[in-house]
Amino acid sequence: MITINNIKLPLDSTEEDIKKAARSALGASILELKILKKSVDARNKADVRFVYTVEVLVKNEEKVLKHCKNKNVAKSERKTYTPPTLAADKNADTVVVGSGPAGLFCAYVLAKAGADVTLIERGLPVEERTKSVELFKKTGILDTESNIQFGEGGAGTFSDGKLNTGIKDERIRFVLETFAKFANGEADDILINAKPHLGTDRLVSVVKNMRKEIISLGASVLFSHRLDDIIVENGKLSGISLTTPEGKKLIPCKRLVLATGHSARDTFAMLKSYNVAMEQKPFAMGVRIEHPREMINRSQYGDFADHDALGTADYKISCTPNGKRGVYSFCMCPGGVVVPAASEEGMLAVNGMSEYKRMADNSNAALLVGVSPDDLMSSDPLAGIELQRKTEKAAWAIGGGYKAPVQLAGDLLNNKASTDIGDIKPSYEPGFVPCDLKECLPDFIIDSIRAALPIFSQMIEGYDRYDAVLTGVESRSSSPVRILRDPVTLCSSIEGLYPCGEGAGYAGGIVSAAVDGIKCAERIIAHISEIG
């Protein structure tokens, strides 16, 4: 097979146009063609185009490659990932805690390998979890065990469902193909789009179908089961203590995968009590900024903004203003809403969410500023969590509950509190309170965002418009803690305890977390095979 890169075509081009361009680039007839990747080139707003990477089958491949001088043509070198297997007679009991992407993929690969797996989740199945989230949005009644942070699918289920990642790994294709498989043919676009996303609506069904497959492979999946404690004997894990619907339960356990996510603060505290090796790690905090969806579309695509082939525009921007810290957009949600992301009473946090079609009135993104261990003024590995809590408590106090603090960009730039909103209506439910965001965020974050807004407006027209809405606080973008693990065995300082995924400090999104879950499964399978 031959790969052809950088085929640029108008937005209205057909599959036949792609084949024609591929024939021209190759200088030979094509028997079969498959699109591998599709992206948007919008650098020239007067001529927005799609860019394709394709794989083709030809006769006399070696001869064609020898005579082709096009630098965009090369022999295909795609690698296929195959999950490991385990001999049926191996003792392979493993407990996985957390059903976000890391936990789901860890349990899935272990179950496919023939291991005996129990997947434990403190929250509810995704169908019931959705009801808990909607109730919180409408009434402000928080279920601390089932919310946007906790429950089947993890925090990523109520997001934009972005599947692009900065890591390079052969397992990525396996992750995407698995998601497409459990979408029952309704998400094959994620296999070719350069910026793939599932959207919350499609993620819900994917997660549910993946759970059913894990169970069909012989694994157990237990909801409303919260990990409270571990039992350690001579430096080795021997059991765990759970809170279940039937009460407290102790179960033997020699292998435990901790894929609990970045908001399992009680779990971090429990691990600290056992002197599990942990360290502070850099993280980020800030706000959500909202603009009209059509404004972002127009800025990114110009006269092509309404073209049916393009969909809703996204963006990714960053800058380091003079004398301030770097500011960057994160988890941009085109045509989405700002959602309540609290998981503890008396604290308020926000996140962003989009459905697949991305057609809500506003587009939003986190504007984040880095927080380093030096900012924490403490050697406590959980000091970052306490800073998160401090900002979340302050945000909660401003609204006297779960109404989010908001400030207009123009008021922030003029260093004054907001008293009302403009034409852009905040999408956050259960409500909002105009304020001065410096009441809930550190000065270095507010000052850096204030300095960045005019710079971002040079990149995206209207970005610093007066009535752009800033909603606080975005405090859960990543884990402020890393649970240390051996780079080979992937075990923590307690034998049999495997820190995994974003919460443990080893991933930064849905796909990278899933990949880390697979790596942990591989290591466990290898260890079981080694010990016999």
Image (cartoon, grey):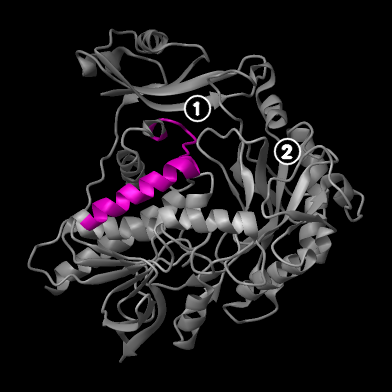
First in sequence, mark 1 or 2: give its number.
1
Q: Where is residue 236, by image quadrant?
A: bottom left
Looking at the rendered image, the disc whose residue lies closer to the viewer, 1 or 2, is 2
Q: Which residues are magenta?
A: 190-215
- Is residue 197 in the magenta section? yes
Q: Residues within 10 Å of mark 2 (few under 14, many from 20)?
A: many
- The residue indicated by pointer 1 is 39
Q: Is residue 229 visible?
A: yes
Residue under the point 72% across and 30% down:
295
Residue type at tag 1: Ser
Residue 325, percent from left and from top: 75, 56
**Quarter in which the N terminus is drawn:** top left
Q: Position of residue 131 (x, y in %)?
A: 49, 55
Alpha-carbon distance for marks 1 and 2? 24 Å
**Could you tell me if residue 441 is visible in this image?**
no
Instruction: Say above or below: 52 vs 484.
Output: above
| Other residues around mark 1 within 10 Å, as few (<14) / some (14–19) / many (≥20) | some
Q: Which secondary structure lies at badge 1?
A: strand
Residue at the disc numbered 2: 291
Q: Is residue 311 above or below residue 316?
A: above
Query: Seen in the image, is 5 located left or right of residue 393?
Result: left
Q: Main secondary structure of the magenta part?
A: helix
Residue 69 drawn at (x, y percent): 38, 15
- Residue 447 horizontal side relative to residue 100, left or right: right
Write the residue at 86% across / 51% down. 412
Q: At 77% from the left edge and 39% from the top edge, which residue is drawn?
A: 424
Left or right: 411 in relation to 302:
right
Please identify the quarter of the rendering in which residue 46 is found.
top right
Residue flagged by tag 2: what amino acid is it?
A: His
Residue 308 in picture, x, y percent from top left: 55, 19
Residue 124 lies in magenta, yes or no?
Answer: no
